[in-house]
Amino acid sequence: MKVRKAVIPAAGLGTRMLPATKTVPKEMLPMVDKPVIQYIIEEAVASGIEDILIVTNRAKSAMDDYFDYYPELEERLLRNGRQQEAAAVRYAADLANIFYVRQKETKGVGHAIWRAKRFVGNEPFAVLLGDDIMRAETPVLKQLMDAGAKYGASAVGVQTVEDCMISKYSSVKVSPLEERIYKVSDMNEKPSPEEKFSNYAILGRYLLSPEIFDILENTPPGYGGEIQLTDGLRQLCRKSPMIAVDFEGRRYDTGNLSGFLEATIDFALASSEIGPWMRAFIKEKAKTL
């Protein structure tokens, strides 16, 4: 079945990026020339997704406004001969069919995904975390969708991390199927190096069957007192096929300052518009260090 829908959980409080995120959603922080969440939506669209649900909270109406039309601004830009800027403003609003639902309580990513049950219905769907940006020749979500279709399975995007970092992620228990694709039989949330199943960590991209909703509805709070998506996935992989895709590409965690700055610099260097300036600026700045 074609995967048409995606869910982006974006209701977190952004505590790793305070004080900027006190009033500005972390997903709306500008990275080069557009907000973080636009890169994520563009990846979904490039993977073939048509409908996107963003799970927000009461402090994040800026996302709703951003992906809407702004006729007064567009008219002013066109009147001043700024066609390129007007097109960029309209482009963001026309990227996809974007819908919103609020997570009325901060109860974890698993609960946020469960809020998408009516939107998704009885079909497979994608999940893209709202602060993970991927840079890849083939969109990372598309890599998961292709592998999931081949094996008739749910899929999680993984890469290896060092022992000292595994406690920040979910570790998966895997057995090889083919190059870069593994069968998943178990996982755990933020394990210590002694508790890990492997150094393969889940990194922000998922392809899930709708069975996950009934599981999440009955999943008790876990790590941090929240309903963890990993706990639901652990049950799902025991009920139906699940694979891990060691995806090709670079992942940036823009939910923390160092990851955000790293992504900003890399994407700026890759820009045809400001890349040459940024490269010259860095070289000049390096001389003074």
Image: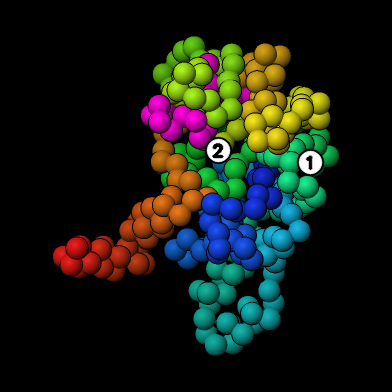
Point out the stretch of residues depicted in magenta. Answer: 152-173
Q: Position of residue 92 (x, y in %)?
A: 60, 62
Above/below status of 238 relative to 192: above
Q: Identify which residue is drawn at 59% across, 53% down.
A: 15
**Which quadrant of the view contains residue 89?**
bottom right
Using the rendered image of the protein, determine whether residue 16 is visible from the camera's viewpoint. Answer: yes
Residue 195 in picture, x, y percent from top left: 51, 19
**Dot 1 and dot 2 residues touching (CB under 8 Å):** no
**What element does badge 2 sit on?**
strand
- For disc 2, the marked residue is 204
Query: Looking at the picture, how far across and down is residue 285, in whole percent?
Result: 22, 67
Residue 89 lies, with reference to residue 198, above or below; the image says below
Left or right, residue 166 beside residue 80? left
What quarter of the picture does the C terminus occupy?
Answer: bottom left
Give me the C-alpha separation between circle 1 and circle 2. Answer: 18 Å
Quadrant for the N terminus, please: top right
Picture quarter containing residue 79? Answer: bottom right
Residue at numbered disc 1: 115
* Of callouts 1 and 2, the N-terminal one: 1
Residue at image location 53% in from the left, 56% down from the top = 17
The quarter of the picture where residue 86 lies is bottom right
Residue occupying the point 58% across, 20% down: 187
Give the image's coloring scheme: rainbow
- Asked which secondary structure carries label 1, the reply is loop
In this rendered view, identify the residue nearer to me: 88 or 190.
190
Residue 59 within the magenta-colored segment of the rendering: no
Observer-nearest of 214 and 16? 16
Up-down relation of residue 164 to residue 284 (above or below) = above
Residue 29 drawn above or below residue 239? below
Q: Amino acid at mark 1?
A: Arg
